[in-house]
Image: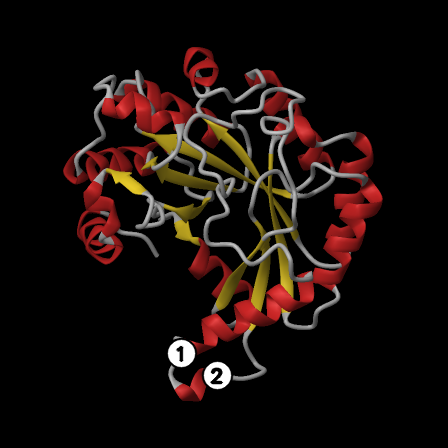
Amino acid sequence: MKQRTVNQYLKDKYGQKIYKIAIDGGFTCPNRDGKLDTRGCIFCSSGGSGDFAGNKNLSITEQIEQGKKRVESKMPSGRQGGNNRYIAYFQAFTNTYASVAHLRSLYMEAVENPHIVSLSIGTRPDCLSDEILNLLEEINCIKPVWIELGLQTIHEKTAEYIRRGYPLQVYDEAVRELKKRNIDVITHIILGLPGETRADMLESVRYVGESGVQGIKLQLLHVLKGTDLEMDYRNGLFKCMTMEEYIDLISDCLDILPDDIIIHRLTGDGPKKILIAPEWSADKKRVLNELQKKIILN
């Protein structure tokens, strides 16, 4: 059995292509507000990994409507209209880092929209209290909820360098609690973090594959303008992978992942206006074409 891409999984489930709308719920992060740190993770831009998300000054409904218009503007005229369905992706910063009452109001506004089939919520494993987990379970009974956990690496030395702010056992516990509530988990791994060997990266991917999560996002390390990572890069403390090295690594990652895990991302792209390196990653179409030549997914 081949691994399935998220696009194929959604088409199989809903009988049509499903699009994602990235939402900014106006959150912050314990790595930003002083609870853990004020600098954020070393690689994180000022947008909190939500550089492509909507405008936080708009309501959730307004962001969904804007997102629909952006998606449909790129479609052939025959595919535009009310039949399209979407996932509301709470993307920017830590999207469970607020009171239960506030989270309920934002999530419910999204799930009550008839064009939304599911929620995808990006967060940290250390921002999932019992009360929040119970809320997510409640919402999951209305429409499916995906929780996207930013693990990035299983290696504590790297985690300390990138200022992740929690140990690996916190991730393990979050996955256990989410699985108890039948909530799907998607884990983010960054490939190419400074100081990590190919074996280190594959170890992280293997660990995630064995942790029982439903999906994985494999993300190329991007050096973005204004981050502390940019300073280390300019000081020559590390080099980014070449495209050939990255594609070979992705192939090895897929070889060790379980067949039933859903592949949500194989690369990702940083905003071109703040991308420092690797420059080759700015040509997303070329990268995806090269990946397609090397890797067979259904």
Q: Amino acid at mark 1?
A: Met
Mark 1 element type: loop
Mark 2 element type: loop
Of residues 206 and 224, the one nearer the viewer is 224
Q: How many marks?
A: 2
At label 1, counting other C-alpha atoms closer than 10 Å, the crowd grade (few under 14, some 14-19, many 20 or more) is few
Q: Residue furthest bottom?
A: 78
Residue that numbered label 1 is attached to: 75
Mark before the other along the chain sequence, 2 or 1: 1
Q: CA distance from mark 2 to mark 1?
A: 6 Å
**Residue ID at (64%, 55%):** 119
257 above or below 267?
A: above
> Dividing the picture into quarters, in which one does residue 218 lie?
top left
39 above or below 92?
A: above
Residue that numbered label 2 is attached to: 80
Of residues 184 and 162, the one nearer the viewer is 162
The x, y position of residue 92, in whole percent, is 56, 45
Q: Are marks 2 and 1 in contact (CB under 8 Å)?
A: yes
Direction from residue 159 to residue 238 in the image, left or right: left
The x, y position of residue 100, in whole percent, is 81, 41
Direction from residue 154 to residue 269 in the image, left or right: left
The x, y position of residue 122, in whole percent, is 58, 42
Q: Is residue 176 visible?
A: no
> Dividing the picture into quarters, in which one does residue 143 lie?
bottom right
**Residue ID at (37%, 21%):** 203
